[in-house]
Image (cartoon, rainbow, N blue to C red):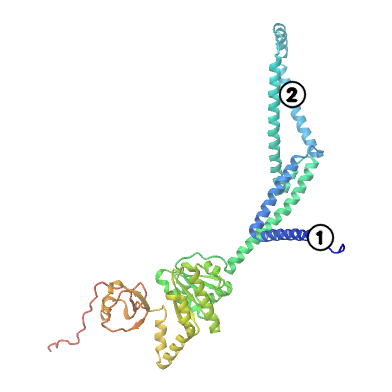
Amino acid sequence: MGGDDGPADKAAAAMPRKKKTSIRFTKARMIYKIDSFLSTKKGQTIMLVGFGLFLMVVSGLFFSLLGEGVHIEGAAETDVGIEQGSGSLKDATSETTLEPTHAGLHGASLSVADETPAPTLDTNETSKDETATAEEGKAEGQAEEHASVITSIWECWLFISDPGAQGEQVEWNKRIFAAAVSIIGLFYFFVILGFVVDSIRDKMEDLKKGRSNVVERDHSLLLGWSDKAVSFVKQLCLANESEGGGVVVVLTEMDKEAVEAELESQLEPSDYHGTKVVVRSGSPLIISDLKKVSAHTARSITILATSIDADKSDAACLRIILGLRGLFKLQGHVVAEVRDIDNEPLVHLVGGSDVETLVSHDIIGRLILLSARSPGLSRVYNSLLGFDGDEFYCKTWPEVVGVAFKDLLPRFPNAAPIGLKTSHGKIVIKPAMDYKIAEGDEIIVLAEDNDTYKAETDPVLVPPVTTTHPILPL
């Protein structure tokens, strides 16, 4: 029984171990927080500024406590020579001033001394004057001590920032202290110089790699990069020509330099038509990268399929749409390229009415099939499906609400109406001639540009062409 330890003894033996473990953990936790703080630029800046202030104040206080030391020979001789020269100059001046009046003042001083009685001094007034003089001397001493501390701190700052300032010290102890502070100051400024150089290099690297923010509004945003991207950018530049140019922002996981090199090799400077193309490196799947390119203020967002695998590409497209709709209040509409037609309903379900899908493989296959069956049709597609020449436009016109489709042609003298998009989203090409345009219907026209046509309130009547001509007499 005596050899067995009870529960109380075991608990008492475990307490020191727990205390040591807790202390060890607290110490490691503190070191971890300090390392985490110093690993950031903010922490490094605060550390450097704090060390500089600490070094200046502490060295200044220590410098103010240094007493008189051994004068340096060259500096001491110079000071003695200056003092002797000034003393001899004062003696010569006083002798020159007093010699002419010495004889006359001697007699006057004797007569005055004989006639004037010796003044009597009051003891109380004398003690008061001595007390006031002592207090004034004490106050002046405190002021001089305060001024000497500030002066010492300022001199130490000069030692840190300018090593040549130590040459003004004429005592060996102060000069040695100034040399030590200057050496520490040299290392301190070396660290600051390296910090500044690293910061500038990081900033230049961010600009070079396209990691800076884009602050734009009503721009066209392209998410992803594929073999269709260059043609897409070229068509956007043509579309912005009538507006005097615009901004096209590209967000891709490729390097900014590679994308810019591809654009430079395939597009001439005249192909931009005043449009500025901005490239940023990043992933469209990351919300911070979408914020970096101002996705919420873009006029239009186009999502390109970047993977050969259809399911993988459509899954990435779906994630991008979820990020855009879930975290942003979009200003413009979204057009997404889908690889597999079976995934189109899911993208429509997630995107809603703000997202339009385009199954690229299906559409390209249709165009190839129609062009093969009708020779020359490919040229028609090439003329219509682009911004070079006439193209399709779709827009609502309140002026033609209630007008029959057959009466639209006189109201659009600079465009050719070919169909409409109903308020329910259905596309109807060449509807019934007696169909009345309802509110919310969009008129599909073929025009040169979006600003070259408009709906006229009064129809422009074209006189009919007569085919009969009067017979002239012979």
Q: Earlier in the sequence, mark 1 or mark 2?
A: 1
Question: Residue tagged by mark 1?
Answer: 9
Q: Nearer the viewer, mark 1 or mark 2?
A: 1
In the picture as drawn, the residue positioned furthest to the front comes out as 1
Where 185 falls versus 275 (above or below)? above
How many marks the image carries: the answer is 2
Where 33 falls versus 306 (above or below)? above
Q: Identify the residue shown where x is 69% and y is 20%.
A: 128
Density class for disc 2 (Cα within 10 Å; few <14, some 14-19, many ≥20) is few
Question: Residue tagged by mark 2?
Answer: 92
In what element is the residue under mark 2?
helix
In the picture as drawn, the residue positioned furthest to the top comes out as 115
| Residue 242 drawn at (x, y percent) | 39, 71
Q: Identify the residue shown where x is 70% and y is 56%.
A: 191
C-alpha span from label 1 to label 2: 96 Å
Specify the quadrant that holds the N terminus.
bottom right
| Residue 206 drawn at (x, y percent) | 60, 66
Judging depth in this view, the residue of 182 and 90 nearest the camera is 182
Mark 1: which amino acid? Answer: Asp
Mark 2: which amino acid? Answer: Ala
Density class for disc 1 (Cα within 10 Å; few <14, some 14-19, many ≥20) is few
Asked whether, in this view, residue 250 is left or right of residue 461, the answer is right
Asked whether, in this view, residue 367 is left or right of residue 208, the answer is left
Numbered tag placed on residue 83 in the rendering: none
